[in-house]
Amino acid sequence: MRLLADENFPHPSVDLLRGHDLNIKAIREIQPGLSDKQVLKLATEENRTILTHDSDYGELIFKYGFKPKAGVIYFRLDDFSPSGPGELVLDIIHRELTLANRLTLITDRSIRQRGYK
């Protein structure tokens, strides 16, 4: 699994995922300030699943037709520790959820997915 942490994804979560030998790049480390469209382009070029707290990705996918093949995981959490989103990613990997061609929404109460092609 190849991951791309958006700039708003907590750095302790990035470190946690790296500690589990996951291939993850962090926008804040490689190119801070990229627009959401540029992040989508990079994720598509490198076949990486985007990890984000930014709701704009749903609109970019379903309204404007950006379709990252490896998918997007959008975290909409009210309260979390800095490593919490990383722990949720590990849980998703453990559950073996399909992420490709899907927007995966994680809230405090549920995990939902909406597919696209």
Image (cartoon, helix red, strand yellow):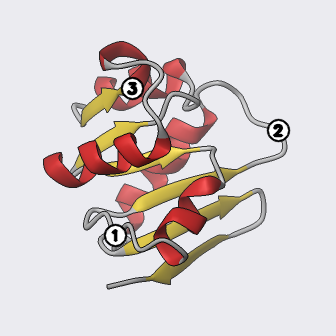
Q: Which residue is mark 2?
A: 79
Q: Which mark is residue 88?
A: none
Q: Which residue is mark 3?
A: 27
User: Residue 52: horizontal and vertical position, in percent?
Assistant: 54, 44
Q: Residue at x 37, y 32 (%)?
A: 17
Q: Is residue 97 above or below residue 5?
A: below
State which quadrant residue 110 falls in: bottom right
How far apart in space, not on screen, are marks 3 and 2 (Cα)?
23 Å
Confirm or deny contact between disc 1 and disc 2 (CB under 8 A): no
Confirm or deny contact between disc 3 and disc 2 (CB under 8 A): no
From where the camera sits, is residue 14 visible? yes
Please tell me whether mark 3 sits on a helix, a strand or a loop.
helix
Please tell me whether mark 2 sits on a helix, a strand or a loop.
loop
Q: Is residue 116 above or below residue 45?
A: below
Which image quarter holds the C terminus?
Answer: bottom left
Q: Of marks 1 and 2, which one's residue comes earlier in the chain?
A: 1
Asked whether 63 or 50 is in front, the reply is 63
Q: Amino acid at mark 2?
A: Asp
Q: Residue at x 33, y 74 (%)?
A: 98
User: Residue 4: horizontal and vertical position, in percent?
Assistant: 34, 39
Q: Which residue is mark 1?
A: 67
Q: Of marks 3 and 2, which one's residue comes earlier in the chain?
A: 3
Outermost residue to the left: 46
Please tell me whether mark 1 sits on a helix, a strand or a loop.
loop
